[in-house]
Amino acid sequence: MNITGMNLILAHLDTKKKVNVFTLIIYGFVICLSALGHIDETVSGLFDRLDRRVSLS
């Protein structure tokens, strides 16, 4: 294998690593937003329940 072929293989592996990291970042971002949505619903539900039980008279 010549130097050019070896450089091509190394460049391909580097590109593949970048794509994998990018994919993991996007996946983490989606999971984080999903978790935040669940947390938002839970906190909203908690405040709704507290609002029904506590009356400021």
Image (cartoon, rainbow, N blue to C red):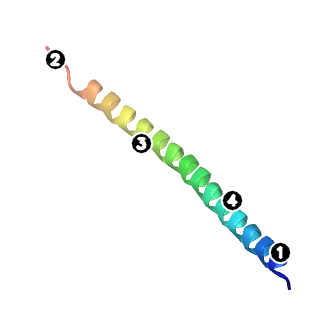
Measure the C-alpha gap from mark 2 to mark 4: 56 Å
- The answer to whether marks 1 and 3 mark residues whose Cβ atoms lie closer than 8 Å is no
Q: Between disc 3 and disc 4, whose residue precedes?
A: 4
Q: Name the residue under label 4.
A: 19
Q: Residues within 10 Å of mark 1 (few under 14, many from 20)?
A: few
Query: What numbered label is drawn on residue 4?
Result: 1
Q: How crowded is mark 2: few (under 14 residues within 10 Å), some or many (20 or more)?
A: few
Q: Name the residue under label 2.
A: 56
Which residue type carries mark 3? Ile
- The answer to whether marks 4 and 1 mark residues whose Cβ atoms lie closer than 8 Å is no
Q: Where is residue 40 in the image (x, y as percent from the top left)?
A: 42, 37
Mark nearer the viewer, 2 or 3: 3
Residue found at the far front of this picture: 3
Q: How crowded is mark 4: few (under 14 residues within 10 Å), some or many (20 or more)?
A: few
Q: Between disc 1 and disc 3, whose residue precedes?
A: 1
Query: What numbered label is drawn on residue 39?
Result: 3
Q: Element type at marker 1?
A: helix
Q: Position of residue 36 (x, y in %)?
A: 46, 42
Residue sitting at x 50%, y 48%: 32
Residue found at the far top of this picture: 57
Mark nearer the viewer, 2 or 4: 4
Q: Quadrant of residue 46?
A: top left
Which residue type carries mark 2? Leu
Q: Element type at marker 4?
A: helix
- Asked if 35 appears above or below 21 in the picture, the reply is above
Q: Element type at marker 2?
A: loop
Q: Element type at marker 3?
A: helix
Mark nearer the viewer, 3 or 4: 4
Which residue type carries mark 4? Val
Residue found at the far left of this picture: 57
Residue found at the far bottom of this picture: 1
